[in-house]
């Protein structure tokens, strides 16, 4: 009997479906639609959805100020949609998802706008949590664009020697 209740509760909680491309684009064009996409979402699902909408905002080819403002509004709505006691975990998850997206992490101004929105909703410590998770994910192999490997550049090719006088090449 108890297992049925637990199973039913798990099924009810798992009702979240990732938004379609059309829903993501609509939320990018009108950020007020974003909160409706997060119904029944877990922390990771909500963070990924926010990252996907921000990616769509970048694809809209807006002025940088408008792009930053829309992304900041998405981030504010993301945090307001979740219980406050889950905000640190949400900041970490969102930082990892943003780091894994070349589009979402392309502009330093966009990253700054997202972090400022987190600070406005929460506090500086929450903004630092996002920043630390982002930086750590960028340094790991699986978390960053290009694998996140900090590989030194290859050495230059060896110099090509000029032929000696009288030396002939086949």
Image (cartoon, helix red, strand yellow):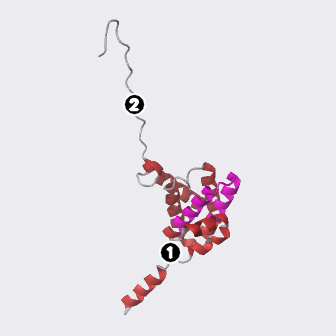
Q: Earlier in the sequence, mark 2 or mark 1?
A: 1
Tell me where residue 107 appears, x and y as whole percent.
Answer: 60, 50
Residue 2 position by quadrant = bottom left
User: In the image, what residue occupies the spot 55% across and 63% down?
Assistant: 52
Residue extent of the magenta highlight: 46-74
User: In the image, what residue occupies the spot 44% across and 83% down?
Assistant: 11
Quadrant, the C terminus: top left
Apparent side of residue 82 relative to residue 66 in the rendered image (left or right) = left
On screen, 92 above or below 108? below
Determine if residue 120 is in view: no
Q: How crowded is mark 1: few (under 14 residues within 10 Å), some or many (20 or more)?
A: few
As drawn, which residue projects farthest toward the left? 170
Residue position marked by numbered label 2 in the rendering: 155
On screen, 102 above or below 83? above
Quadrant, the N terminus: bottom left
As drawn, which residue projects farthest toward the top? 166
Which residue is more in the foreground, 144 or 139? 144
Q: Would you say residue 52 sits in the magenta stretch?
A: yes
Residue 59 position by quadrant = bottom right
Tell me where residue 8 appears, x and y as whole percent.
Answer: 43, 87
Tell me where residue 83 appears, x and y as whole percent.
Answer: 57, 74
On screen, 40 above or below 160? below
Q: Which of marks 2 and 1 is in front?
A: 1
Apparent side of residue 114 relative to residue 16 in the rendered image (left or right) = right
Which residue is more in the foreground, 56 or 79? 56
Q: Would you say residue 57 sits in the magenta stretch?
A: yes
Residue position marked by numbered label 1 in the rendering: 17
User: In the image, what residue occupies the spot 45% across and 85% down?
Assistant: 9
Q: How far apart are marks 2 and 1 (CA)?
A: 48 Å
Q: Which structural element holds mark 1?
A: loop
Q: Residues within 10 Å of mark 2 (few under 14, many from 20)?
A: few
């Amino acid at each position: 009997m108890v297992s049925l209740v637990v199973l039913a509760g798990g099924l009810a909680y798992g009702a979240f479906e990732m938004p379609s491309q059309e829903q993501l684009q609509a939320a990018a064009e009108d950020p007020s639609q974003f909160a409706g996409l997060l119904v029944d979402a877990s922390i990771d699902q909500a963070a990924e959805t926010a990252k996907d909408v921000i990616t769509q905002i970048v694809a809209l080819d807006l002025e940088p100020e408008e792009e930053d403002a829309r992304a900041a509004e998405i981030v504010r709505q993301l945090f307001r949609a979740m219980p406050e006691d889950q905000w640190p975990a949400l900041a970490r998850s969102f930082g990892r998802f943003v780091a894994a997206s070349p589009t979402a992490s392309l502009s330093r101004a966009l990253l700054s706008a997202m972090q400022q929105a987190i600070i406005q909703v929460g506090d500086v410590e929450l903004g630092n949590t996002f920043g630390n998770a982002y930086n750590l994910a960028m340094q790991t192999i699986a978390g960053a664009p290009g694998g996140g490997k900090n590989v030194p550049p290859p050495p230059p090719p060896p110099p090509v020697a000029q032929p000696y006088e009288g030396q002939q090449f086949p």
